[in-house]
Amino acid sequence: MSNKTDIAKGAAADKPREDAALLPPVDVIEDAGGITLWADLPGVPKDRLNLQVEGDTLSIEAELALAVPEGMEASHVEVNLPRYRRVFTLSRELDPNKVEAKFEHGVLRLRIPKAEHAQPKRIEVQIG
Amino acid sequence: MYARSLFPRDVFAELDRLQREMQQAFDTGPSIRGLTRGYPALNVGGTPTSVEVFAFAPGLDPATLDVQLEKGTLTIAGERKAPEVPEKATVHIGERFAGRFRRVVSLPDDVDPNAIQARYRDGVLHVSVRRKEEAQPRRIAIQ
């Protein structure tokens, strides 16, 4: 088996596609005030993380950077691409201008609050 | 040929065998501990002087990570907690791993169990084990 993909270069050396990317696993939790998104992006330093909101599209792109010793030959590879990418469509009640991001130990936490006007209101039900 | 099938002319059995052999050629076979894509994902490599293991284990407190090397077997174990879900919240997507995990790697015979280093950075645990001096390639001078 020729399984000698360099981790640092990832599949770039024998690229199937120039921009092939891993799909990071996420958790998306919605409460009354907004949505919290968690994404696993291990191996990504802070400066290689790229978050973008364009219209109603939220995209997460990140590049891996590992301290691989020179001349290392990989013998077993499960993380076989050098980047992550995942795109979400935001719904209209979310406020893309107030997205808060935290990135620690390879886990991204995004908080996307709901716009003022979309905050839940309790509707009194009249009887009669 | 005779040992393989009692009915050597059974085409279906032959096809079956062929398919199995093809599959084995492509897969390394499932691990005894389940799917090969577990948490943390592992990349393993080597240089002439060391063996390098990368465990992609994001979101952990490094102090709770348990890394052990015993009889040439490297074990990485720990626990990852699920994010807190506030009351009345809805989980729309829940793909991230949560719970206890354990992954095991057998290292080659020539590693030195006393020369092991483990670092946790950006959610990746990097374990580097040096190979024994006597196992390292050496250039022999010709007299």
Image: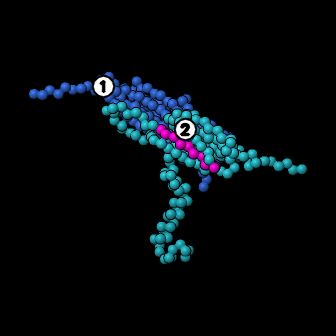
Chain colours: A blue, B cyan
Question: Does residue A11 appear left or right of residue B142 in this picture?
Answer: left
Does residue A36 sit above or below A116 in this rendering? Answer: below
Residue marked by disc 1? A119
The N terminus of chain B appears in which quarter of the rendering? bottom right
Q: Chain of mark 2?
A: B
Element assignment for label 1: loop
Task: Find the magenta span and give its range.
Answer: B71-80
Residue B116 in view (yes/no): yes
Q: Chain of mark 1?
A: A
Location of residue B51 by image quarter = top right
Mark 1–mark 2 distance (CA, rounded to whole Å): 41 Å
Residue B44 is a magenta residue: no
Q: Please state which of residues A86 and A33 is positioned toward the viewer in this rendering.
A: A33
Q: Residue at x 45, y 31 (%)?
A: A109
Tell me the kind of residue under disc 2. Answer: Leu
Label 2 crowd (10 A; few <14 / some 14-19 / many >=20): some
Q: Position of residue A48 (x, y in %)?
A: 54, 32
Task: Tally the marks.
Answer: 2
Q: Residue at x 51, y 74 (%)?
A: B5
Q: Please state which of residues B86 and A94 is positioned toward the viewer in this rendering.
A: B86
Residue furthest front as drawn: B70
Element assignment for label 2: loop
Q: Position of residue A56 (x, y in %)?
A: 38, 31
Q: Residue at x 49, y 64 (%)?
A: B19
Q: Position of residue B131 (x, y in %)?
A: 70, 46
Residue marked by disc 2? B65
Residue furthest right as drawn: B143
